[in-house]
Amino acid sequence: MEKKNVVIDDFDFSMIADFFKRVDRQGPGGDWETRLATSMIPDFKRKIRIADIGCGKGIQTFVLADEYDAEIDAVDILPEMLENIEMESRSRNMEENIHPVQASMDALPFRKKYYDLIWAEGSIFIIGYEKGLSYWREFLKPDGFVAVTECSWLGNKRPENMKWILDNLPEIDSIEHKIHQMAEGGYEPYAHFILPETCWTKNYYEPMQPAMEAFLKDHPGDSKAQAFIDRLKEEIAYYKENKDCFGYVFYIGRKV
């Protein structure tokens, strides 16, 4: 039987947190792209409530705080990520507007129909695209918006090693099908755009290099730590080899 590729979820939360707390971004993205997504959503013209789900250290959370007059619940299951949001909120005098919430994205401790906007950059794959859109819809007000990034095929070309990507991203599909799934999930597909390569390379993978070295120095002789870094290096190499086949797409929908 062919061996299954190692995926990030194979490692325990403590190791994942210990590495990703060392980098600003926990997934591909960019401040400009976050702002572009907000510009595609109609102006609410009032103070709103936002849930940033799978927020990580909150780099996009603070972009949202700059773009909106909003109360933001920043949700992550890892306390190490939320500690950064607490510190950053204090340094920016935003404690009254940004609220760290430790919770799993499939068991949110919120009231139904509470939010005007649900945001999830680089995180919906954890719960699953269709499942996440369906479950999170319960927490949106009527005509509320959802904005997520999801890995998608960029055309008809496919990687030679399909097994790796299907092991790691089993729900990857075409942009057209992702839009169809959003519509089937009870949303009006409102806008979408492909994140540029720099969101992966310059913003996400390049800052990982010094973090990898520091992580291994802090875990000398730890075979699990080495396996974790090997997995990340494998991902980087796979993306560079196949970046014309797949990428992240921002999908924006309105609850109907």
Image (cartoon, rainbow, N blue to C red):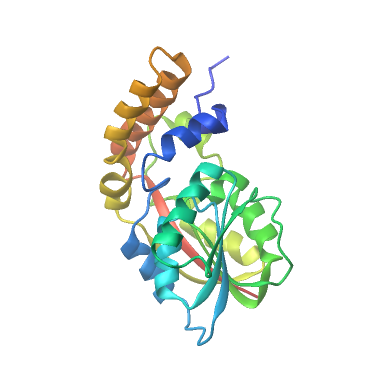
Q: Is residue 1 left or right of residue 233?
A: right
Residue ranking furthest to the top: 221
Residue ranking furthest to the bottom: 45
Q: Is residue 31 left or right of residue 254?
A: left
Total of numbered circles in the picture?
Answer: 0
Q: Is residue 40 visible?
A: no
Q: Is residue 192 left or right of residue 254?
A: left
Which residue: 58% across, 14% down? 1
Which residue: 69% across, 66% down? 139
Q: Is residue 3 visible?
A: yes
Quadrant for residue 32, please give it. bottom left
- In the rendered image, the quadrant that contains the C terminus is bottom right
Expressed as whole percent of the image width and height from the top left, the position of residue 136 reads 66, 61
Which residue: 55% across, 51% down? 124
Expressed as whole percent of the image width and height from the top left, the position of residue 247 reads 38, 49
Quadrant for residue 184, please give it. bottom right
Expressed as whole percent of the image width and height from the top left, the position of residue 145 reads 57, 72
In terms of depth relative to the viewer, which is nearer, 190 or 201? 201
